[in-house]
Amino acid sequence: MENETNHEEELENQVASTETEEPKDMVPKQDYDELDDRYKRILAEFENFKKRSGKEREGLYNSILSDVVEGILPVLDNLENAMKVETQDEEYKKGIELVIKQFQEFLTSKGVEEIKAIGETFDPELHEAVSSIQDESLGEKEIAQEYRKGYKIGNRVIRHSMVVVAN
C-alpha cells in the first residue's frame, strides 16, 4: 500500500509540475502577442487594400465608360437634330425615334444621366455659358436656352451643357 501511495504522490507531482511549466512546443506569451498583433495589422492592411483597389477599379471603369460615351454623344446629337427636320416620311421619323430611344436606354443602363438645363440656375460645374441675354421674365442666372445637352455619370461630368444664361 505504501508503494501505491508513493506512486500516486509521484503522479500528482508530475501533473503539478507540468501545469506550472510551459510545454516545449508552446509559444511564449510575449511571442504569441507579437504574432497576434502582426496578424491583425496585416489583416487590416489587406482589408484596406481590397477597398482601395475596388475604388480604383470603379474609377477606371467610370473613366473608360465616360470616354466611350463621350465619343458616341455626337451621334446622338445628330440623330436628335435629324428628328427636328420636317419630313413627309413617317416611317423614317419612327426609325430615328427608335434609334434615339435605344441610345437613351443604353445610356441609362450605364448610369449616364442628362444634365438638366432649361429653367435651372447656371452652375459652372455642369453648364458652359456661350452667351447671355436680358429677360425680365427669367430669374438671375437662369438658363434660357440649351444649345447642346450635357451628360454625367454620378458626380462626374462627361460633357457640359452649352447654354444661354439670362440676366
Image (cartoon, rainbow, N blue to C red):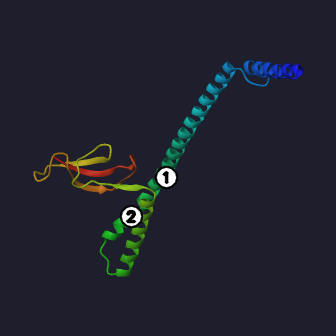
Residue sitting at the far right: 3
- Secondary structure type for disc 1: helix
Front residue of 106 and 33: 33
Residue at 60% in and 33% down: 43
Q: Which mark is residue 11?
A: none
Circle 2 packing at 10 Å, graded few (<14), some (14-19), many (20+), is few
Closer to the N terminus: mark 2 or mark 1? 1
In this figure, which residue is indicated by the disc labeled 1? 65
Distance between the alpha carbons at the discs numbered 2 and 1: 21 Å
Left or right: 128 in relation to 153: left
Q: Position of residue 30 (x, y in %)?
A: 66, 19
In this figure, which residue is indicated by the disc labeled 2? 78
Residue at 20% in and 49% down: 142
Circle 1 packing at 10 Å, graded few (<14), some (14-19), many (20+), is some
Q: Position of residue 87 (x, y in %)?
A: 32, 77
Q: Is residue 1 above or below residue 160?
A: above
Q: Is residue 101 above or below residue 145?
A: below
Residue sitting at the far left: 136
Left or right: 165 in relation to 10: left
Picture quadrant where residue 105 is located? bottom left
Q: Nearer the viewer, mark 2 or mark 1?
A: 1
Q: Amino acid at mark 2?
A: Asn
Left or right: 156 in relation to 161: right
Q: Is residue 95 above or below residue 114?
A: below
Front residue of 162 and 24: 24
Residue at 19% in and 46% down: 141
Residue at 67% in and 25% down: 35
